[in-house]
Image: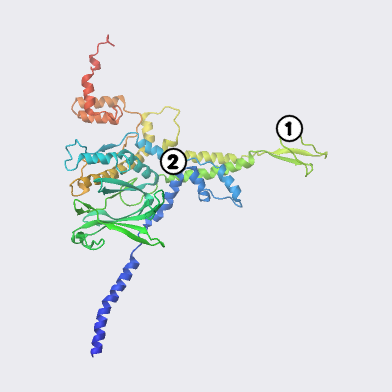
Amino acid sequence: MSQDRTIVKVSAILMPLTLSCLRAFWNEEQIMPANQTHPDYDAMLPFWVRVRDVVSGEDAIKAAGEKYLPRLTQQSDDDYDAYKTRATFFNATARTAHGYVGMIFRKPPYIQLPDRHDQVAKTVPGAAMEVVGNDVDMLGTSLYSYCKQVLEEVVTVGRSGTLVDWEDHEGRAYLTHYKAENIINWRSERVNGRNLITLVVLRESVPDPQGDDPFDTTVAEQIRVLKLVDGSSLMVDGPMEGRTAEGRRCVVDVWRQAKTGKDWVMASSSIPRRLGKALPQIPFVFHGSRHSRPEVEPVPLNDVLVLNLSHYRLDADYKHGLHYTALPTAWVSGFDKKATLKMGSSGAWVADHPGATAGFLEYKGHGLGAFENALGHLEGLMVVVGSRLLEGQRKVAETAQAMQIRQSGEDSILSSMATSVSESLTQAMRWAFWWHSTEVLPEVVTDQQVLVELNTDFRTHGIAAMELTALVNAWKEGGISQTTLFDMLRRSEVLPDGRLNEEESALIKKEKPAAAIEPSAV
C-alpha cells in the first residue's frame, strides 16, 4: 500500500513536469523564426526585384541575362552574349517614374510645423521640431528631401515605411526609412475599436559587431521586431514594472544570426518609453500609392514595365535580324578553294576557270519591317500607359479644355499618390511631434500643429484672365478673405511661393495703383 502511495506521489510530481515539457516543446515548435516573411511579401518580392532592375537601367537588365532576354534555340554562350550586346534597352519605366515625381514636386510641399516662435503649439518645444524638420533621420536629410525619397519609393514599387524612434543622447525624435523589401512581416488587429499595427518585422544592415578592424566595412544583417503585446504579459530579460500595466505596450526585439549555422538569436529586447511610460502603439507608418495601411498594393508602374521588357526583347530580335541581313555577304563560284580572296579596292579576284563568277548576297524581303512596326506600336502603348511623360510636344494648337481632358486620367493617378503619401508623411511627423509633446496619443495632434501636403496641382498653363478677375472681384465683394486670395494666387503661380502674405500686402501699399498713374507719365 505504501509502495502504491509512493508511486502516486511520484506520478503527481512527474505529471506536471511532463506536461510542462510537452507544452514547452509544442510552443517551441509553433514559434516562427524571426526572419519569417509574410505571404504577401513572398508574393510581391519578385515584382519588386523586377521593377528595381528595370528602373536601374540597361546594365542591370543585361546582367540578369536570360531572366529578361531568353536565349534563342541552340544558341551558344558567345552567340547569346553578342545577341544580348546588340540589343538596346529603352528605359521608359524610369523616365515615367522620374516624370511623376517631378510633376508632384514641381511645387514644393506645404509643411506645417511649429517653430521656436510659434505660440499655437505650447505643448512641444518649437526648437526641437525645427531640428527634426532640418534633419529628420539624423543623417542630414531635410524633411523636403525625405518627402521626395518616400515618394520615389512609392512611385517605383508602391510601398515603403517609416519608423519613428527616440535618440536619448541628443534628446530628439528621428525618422528611419525602410524600403518595401526590408519590411518582411507585419500584422494588424482590432484593438479597442481601432485597427492597430500589432507586429512589424524589419530587416536591417548594420556594421558587423564582431569585426575588430576599424577599416572593415563589412555589414551584418539583423532583424528588428516591434510587437504590441498585452501589458500583463510583458517579460523582457526578467520581470519588469510594465508587467502589471494595463493595455497594450510596444516591445522591440533585435535578432542576429548565430556565429554557426542559420539560427537566429535574440541580441537585445527592450520596452521603449516616453515620459516614463511604455508606448501604447508601434511607432511605424506604412507609405502606399493609395493608402497607408499595411496591405500590399500592386506596383504602380507594372503596366509600363511589362511593355518596356517586351520592347527590349523585340529590339534584340530586330538587331539580331539586322546583323545577319543588312550586311552584304560575298560569294564566289569557280575559284580555287585554297586561294585567298582579299576584300577591298586594293586587290582583284582572278580565277583560272573560265566560268568563275562572284557576287553579293543581299536581303530584299520585308520581314524586318514587321519588327519596326511592332517596336513603334509598343512605344505608342508605353506613351498611352505612361501618359504624356514619354510623349513629345504636340505640334498643333490645343485648347485648355482639350488639354484638361487629356490630362484628367493621369492627374487622378498622381493626385491619389500625392494624397496618400501626404497622409502617411503627416502621420510620421505627428509621431515625431508626439515624442516631444505631452499629448496622450499621436492621433490627438491636429493639422494646425503638424501637416505635410504634397502638390496636387499639375497644371502648367497658370490661371486664365477671367478666373483672375473673378477672384479679385470675390475679394472686393467680401466673398473671400485676402489670405484666401493670396493663397489661391500662389497656387496658380501668380505669386511666388517664398513670398509671405504680409510681404505682398506691404508691396501693394507701397506701389501706386495703375489706375492712378497719369497717361503722360507712361
The chosen color scheme is rainbow
Q: Amino acid at mark 1?
A: Ser
Residue ranking furthest to the front: 213
Q: CA distance from mark 1 to mark 2?
A: 50 Å
Rendered image quadrant of residue 198: bottom left
Q: Is residue 183 above or below residue 402?
A: below
* Residue underneath mark 2: 94
In percent of width and height, residue 180 lies at 37, 49
300 left or right, relative to 489 = right
In percent of width and height, residue 333 lies at 77, 42
The reply to whether residue 185 is in sight is: no
Q: Is residue 161 above or below residue 114?
A: below
Estimate how packed mark 1 is, as few (under 14), some (14 to 19) or many (20 or more) residues with alpha carbons within 10 Å.
few
The reply to whether residue 429 is in sight is: yes
Rendered image quadrant of residue 271: bottom left
Residue sitting at x 24%, y 13%: 517
- Badge 1 element: loop
Quadrant location, the C terminus: top left
- Badge 2 element: helix
Quadrant location, the N terminus: bottom left
Q: Amino acid at mark 2?
A: Ala
* Residue underneath mark 1: 346
317 left or right, relative to 399 = right
Which circle's residue, 1 or 2, is located before the other in the chain? Answer: 2
Residue sitting at x 64%, y 40%: 325
Q: Is residue 238 above or below residue 407?
A: below
| Of 299 and 172, the residue lying toward us | 172
In percent of width and height, residue 101 lies at 37, 38
Q: Which mark is residue 371?
A: none
Whether residues under marks 1 and 2 lie with C-beta atoms below 8 angstroms apart, the answer is no
In percent of width and height, residue 413 lies at 36, 41
